[in-house]
Amino acid sequence: MERFFMSKALVINFPAEGHINPTIGLVNELVNRGEEVIYYCEEEYRHKLKNIDVEFRNYGDYLKEINLKNRMKDMFHPLQMMYRFLRVTENAIPFLLEEITREKYDYMIYDQHFLLGRILAEMLPIPTIASCTTFAMNKEMLEEIPLGNIESNPTSPLVEECQMIVNRISDRYGVNVDSLEQLFHYESDMTLVFTSKYFQPHAHCFNHTFKFIGPSITSRQEIVEFPLYRLDGKEVIYISMGTELNKQPEFYEKCLHAFKEFNGIVVISVGKEIEMRRFLNMPPHFIIRPYVPQLEVLKYTDVFITHGGMNSVSEGLYYDTPLVVLPITNDQPFVAKRVEDLNAGLTLDYTKITSDLLKETVRNVLNNKTYREGSKIIGQSLREAGGCKKAVDAIFQFKREFLSSSLDK
């Protein structure tokens, strides 16, 4: 019986921090329980898994067109982004199929929002598990975010180009995709959702195949010099715009002005693209760094100003931290709305930010215990959701149900 549990898992992941980080703890737990894991992603992310006994493989040169620079360029042009993703998907499928079919896998884990993974999930004759690093989406919810309206401009030449690629993929590989909309509605055998049932909007709409496991909060084994002692016993504002949207010099200047008289500590993570010399004259109660050990800082934080990426929001709430959310694109407005709906913070229009508005909003969040209480309720739900151990428990139960039935045939 024990032999049955030693399986070989194929992981197809999207090359971005917010999609990779939640899976690190998951694959580590799989390996610790005896699973063999083959993990596909872009080469620049190999270091993320260097301390885990997985076999890392890259996508060759097929995904270069959707690198971070191009994704940033297309951030506010969802049709153009869709076109790029479809084009690299069509080109990468033959390469990946040839590699994957050389070996036998027992099940596949793929990023639910990665078109290449979604297409392969339907093509390969193995059980599939979707990794959902934001809220689970149904058709109605998807229409509330930008990519959900991808077909709202049917006369655009790009829509026609995208549809032609979809048709070619569908015809060549027998994939059931009749429209662009269907790209987002493939139902896997199981979906791991990295949030809690409480934080998930419309959680009652999702059946038993959706497992709400909470965020993957694991030690990142970072060696970063940071004066955490300065935060102890102080009121702390932490500001981070994530890893992809952090080149925001004008915004950071507004933060400097807004909190120049703050009676506490202000920590700002500005990313690697900002010249640090512009902050040489910052007030002494500011700590501004290209990189900040976020999980450690959040343990001391009283208000977290964030772009609203699901990972950042989940990490903040995991530590019961009220939020000020400045959503910019993708699912961020949707996440921000949920934060407000559950009284865990406030949302501001990023395009209308002023120093005075930032100052007043943070003061409001700090002085209103409703937001602290709201964040604590969500935080408790996230901590109790089970994390990676529950996820792997679900995968092993999944194997009992799916793989044992195939062995009996």
Image (tube, rainbow, N blue to C red):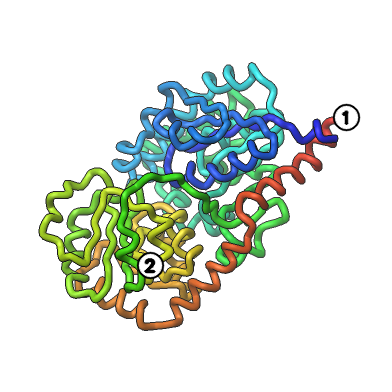
**Quadrant in the rendering for residue 72:** top left
Q: Quadrant of residue 233?
A: bottom left
* Marker disc for residue 301: 2
User: Percent x, y for residue 372?
Assistant: 45, 76
* Residue 72 visible in the displayed image: yes
- Alpha carbon of mark 2 to alpha carbon of mark 1: how far? 55 Å
The answer to whether the residues at label 2 and label 1 have Cβ atoms under 8 Å apart is no
The residue positioned 48% from the left and 65% from the top of the image is 319
Say the numbered circle drawn on residue 317. none
Name the N-terminal-most of marks 2 and 1: 2
Above or below residue 314? Residue 53 is above
In the image, what residue type sits under mark 2?
A: Thr
**The C terminus sits in image quarter:** top right
Residue 34 location (% of width, % of height): 69, 35
As displayed, is residue 126 above or below residue 220? Answer: above
73 left or right of 148?
A: left
At x 80%, y 31%, the residue is 3
In this rendering, position of residue 91 left or right of residue 361:
right
Residue at 35 percent across and 58 percent down: it is 307
Q: Nearer the viewer, residue 184 or 320?
A: 320
User: For this rendering, which residue is in front, 50 or 107?
Assistant: 50
Q: Amino acid at mark 1?
A: Lys
- Residue pushed farthest right? 408
Residue 44 percent across, percent down from the top left: 39, 31
Give the farthest residue toward the front.
229
Badge 1: residue crowd in 10 Å (few <14, some 14–19, many ≥20)? few
Badge 1 marks a residue whose secondary structure is: loop
Indicate the quadrant where residue 298 lies.
bottom left
Residue 34 sits above or below residue 234 on the image: above
- 147 in relation to 16, above or below: below
**Numbered mark located on residue 409 in the image:** 1
